[in-house]
Amino acid sequence: MIVIKFGGTSVGDAERVANAIDIVAERRHLHPIIVVSALSGVTNDLVAAADAACAGDGQRVNDIVDRVRQRHEDVAMHLVQQKFDFFDAFVKRLSKQIEEIHTILQGVTLLREVTKRGHDKIVSIGEKLSSVLFAYSMMMRELPSEHVESEDVIWTNDHFGGATPRMDLTTEAARKTLLPIVERNHIPVMGGFIGRTAGGATTTLGRNGSDYSAAIVAAAVGADEVQIWTDVDGLLTCDPRFVPSARVIDHLSHEEAAELASFGAKLHPRTLEPAIEAGIPVRILNTQNPASPGTLITREGTARATGPRSVARKRNVTVVHMTSNKMLGAHGFLARLFHEFEELKISVDLIATSEVSVSVTVDERHDMEQLQERLRGVADVEIIDGQCIIAIVGRNLLADALVGARVFEALRGVPMQMLSLGRSGLNLSIVVNDADSDNAIQRIHHALFEQAVAV
Ligand code: ASP
Ligand code: MG
């Protein structure tokens, strides 16, 4: 049994839905359970509709609801072949759902406010519509499928807008609702992103939460694999937009994937945790290129113990150098410095220290003047904007000095601001001027992944 999750772009229009259905049909023997995101852009539209309603803009609400309705109907219209009865049933159901959302939004328009709970009810409609659409589309193509309400499967706490699953209740509910359908040799289809509280209120798992849903469901039913179908070939050795020779990484550990995610990989491995923790492998695959093997993510990763896997960057970074003689031999000094960061709610990424100085990186958007003010008297502060972190992610990067040697050789002539590598050797981070970063990352990628001798 496998869980197949389709992201919003993979069900964005009729052609893509048809494509996704082909993918399911080819995997029917694996007893798939399908989890779908909202059609691309629909969740954003619903957020905009809720905002418009709060602003009392009924006309805009109507426009958005009409557009959402039309998109779903168009997809079904394009897919319908002989099975018009399923098409008619779908349009009926769509009308009912749209009517409900419209009524809720009209209420909000009158009140000009929405609770977090109400907001979840509104934005969850995207997955409700897409999952019903997908289930009916499969039936129109003669694949026996059954729609399942996500609220009957995933039970959560009541943190609306970012709920956490209650795995004990979810396990029981998921087995009860999904397994009989699988046993009938039918294909269950449910929306991602949505759950329910014990009291029956609709919750959402946070933006991009459909991956999370897939992982939760897989853990609950004890699936053999989770397949995340998206619009890229998997996780890559570098961003192909500026390193065309970037290639797909075949196998990564959960830790490595998590490290990459913090550098802007589209995937958020935190959301894969329920599956990974349960020992269920996760595969990232491309709907537009189904033949490509994708990237496999498992708890332990590949048997190969060491070496770089990918090089990524994070732009718009500010370096804060703090220097003070008071630091020499003192205790509690770092705590004092970081207390100020905490007070200002500034999150620190990298840290490097010497006897009398501490350097950190922070996101550029923070108010640095305030920080400087607060640190006056504690340390001399130098702030350098326009920096970029380049991260070489892999395993045990310290085990072989060759990795470092290649990286530094590649960076010959490029000034560096900071350097950091933790004990786990998961992430060798180098801070360079943003203006140098294209060049730097291309050279590092070349040195680590393109040279004849593999590291
Ligand atoms: N539709 C939701 C969102 O856009 C969840 C998802 O796509 O995973 O955030
Ligand atoms: Mg999405």
Image: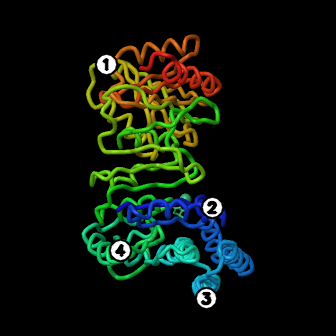
User: Quadrant where the N terminus lies?
Assistant: bottom left
Image height check: is 281 above or below 179?
A: above
Residue at which label 1 appears: 328
Inter-mark Cα distance, 3 to 2: 23 Å
Which mark is drawn over residue 178?
A: 4
Q: Pointers 1 and 3 in contact (CB under 8 A)?
A: no
Q: Which residue is drawn at 47% across and 75% down?
A: 145
Q: Quadrant of residue 302?
A: top left
> Which amino acid type is shown beneath numbered disc 2?
Arg
**Earlier-in-chain disc, 2 versus 1:** 2
Q: Do the residues labelled 2 and 4 touch (CB within 8 Å)?
A: no
Q: Does the residue labelled 2 lie within 8 Å of ligand 2?
A: no
Between marks 2 and 4, how big is the CA–CA gap?
A: 25 Å
What type is the residue that disc 1 sits on? Answer: Leu
CB at disc 4 and ligand 1 closer than 8 Å: no
Label 4 near label 1: C-beta < 8 Å?
A: no
- Mark 3 sits on what residue? 92
* Residue 373 appears anywhere in the view: no
Residue occupying the point 38% across, 82% down? 200
| Whole-number angstrom distance, CA of label 3 to CA of label 4 | 25 Å
| Of the image marks 1 and 4, the number of the one nearer the N terminus | 4
